[in-house]
Image: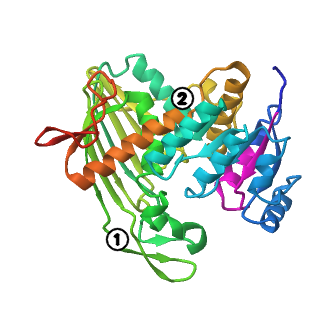
Amino acid sequence: MPGQRFKIGIVGVQPGRSWAARAHIPALRALSETFEIVGIANTSEASAQAAATEMGLSKAFAGVAELIAAPEVDIVTVAVKVPPHFEILKAAIEAGKHVYCEWPLGNGLAEAREMAALAAAKGVLGVVGTQARIAPEIEYLRHLINDGFVGEVVSTTLVARGGSALRGGTIPDRKPYGYLLDRANGAILLTIPVGHTLAALRDVVGDAAEISAVVARRRPTAVAVDTGEILPVSAPDQVLVSGVLASGATISIHYRGGAPLDGDGLFWEIRGTKGDIRVSGSSGHAQMVQLSLMGARAGETAFRALEIPASYRTGWPEDVESGNVARLYARMAQDLLTGTRTAPSFEDAVAVHRIIHAIERSAESGCRLVLTDRKGTRTTVLAGKRRTSACCWT
């Protein structure tokens, strides 16, 4: 109903460093007419109380179970590391709470599918934090593509860096960032920056139909700057993908670990029959950085800046991180009030997890994998069944 305020409990708040502290809390405060933060929970009550005091929040729950059980909590926001996502989300959904989960949704495709199925069965709204999809630059880019700026999309190329905290040879601090070095934790170059950007790419140019990939680890160790320790690395620092979209357009992606030397960390070009558009940013974390657009139509000899209309930014926090998260929360509220499905959903998350799974399988097997036919219809052939000597179904 109009004027309703949704009450949120946040799991995972560490002042000064966590994503919840940097993005979620400022976003929700900017939407104070729609949302109220009723409390937070961390791994211990003492940690939650310290965070609540520093962030100016009214309540620290004794633990995650108490937050989930609290009758005043309408929405549980899960902003912790990836491995506990499944357990926390399952408990929240079974308690009948709506949930906002940071990306990646699960530690792999199987967990994501199970959580999406559970949310659907319980009739609760599950949204996932792939907020690059609703960044103003991406929304305007989608409008330009749909409006025919480039004509028919012929190809898309994406070259990006994953950031210094993801396999650049060093990590700033061992405690918050060390878990990123272990592939088993599901928070790696392929799942985080590549996954966020893939979610936006799907919205703009459509789904992948065929994929061939190489995933490699070129740096076997990383140095923790705060302690000087040399830590083992099992997570990949190179992701190369080539393939075909459902439209027939070709796609090429190369993500590399480490921060760019010159601050130019993302180059995404969409080529078409009538023109080209380029997206750039300081990092391959498209969900976290200011993006810019340039374009050129047939007959032009130079790219020109494509200014984002003011209407795409007006009324939102100017900060990129909290602004994009605020846009996602606003969509979640709209969906809860009207029954629409405008926020990135668990089902959307499964679609991105499926592409990541195909990239991993292609890299492991050396096969080109078929995800959909060229019209975008999902295949039903069993995984691993060979189509030709060089192509497998997934």
Q: What residue would you read off at disc 2?
A: 308
- Numbered circle sitting on residue 112: none
Label 2 CA crowd tier, 10 Å (few <14, some 14–19, many 20+): some
Q: Secondary structure at mark 1?
A: loop
Image quarter of the N terminus:
top right
- In the image, taking residue 230 as reference, residue 318 lies left or right, namely right
How far across and how far down the image is residue 79, in percent?
65, 52
Q: Is residue 131 visible?
A: no
Indicate whether 338 appears above or below 186.
above
Q: Is residue 119 visible?
A: yes
Q: How many marks?
A: 2
- In the image, taking residue 56 as reference, residue 234 lies left or right, namely left
The earlier-in-sequence mark between 1 and 2 is 1
- The amino acid on which the numbered mark 1 sits, given as a three-letter code, is Arg
- The amino acid on which the numbered mark 2 sits, given as a three-letter code, is Ile
Look at the image and say whether residue 44 sits in the magenta stretch. Answer: no
- Residue under the point 40% across and 64% down: 235
How far across and how far down the image is residue 329, in percent?
68, 35
Among all residues in the image, which is located at the extreme left?
389
- In the image, taking residue 156 as reference, residue 33 lies left or right, namely right
Label 1 CA crowd tier, 10 Å (few <14, some 14–19, many 20+): some
Q: Nearer the viewer, mark 1 or mark 2?
A: 1
Look at the image and say whether residue 9 sits in the magenta stretch. Answer: yes
Indicate whether 311 appears above or below 348.
above
Give the residues in magenta.
6-26
- Residue under the point 80% across and 31% down: 34
Q: Quadrant of residue 382?
A: top left
Q: What residue would you read off at disc 1?
A: 219
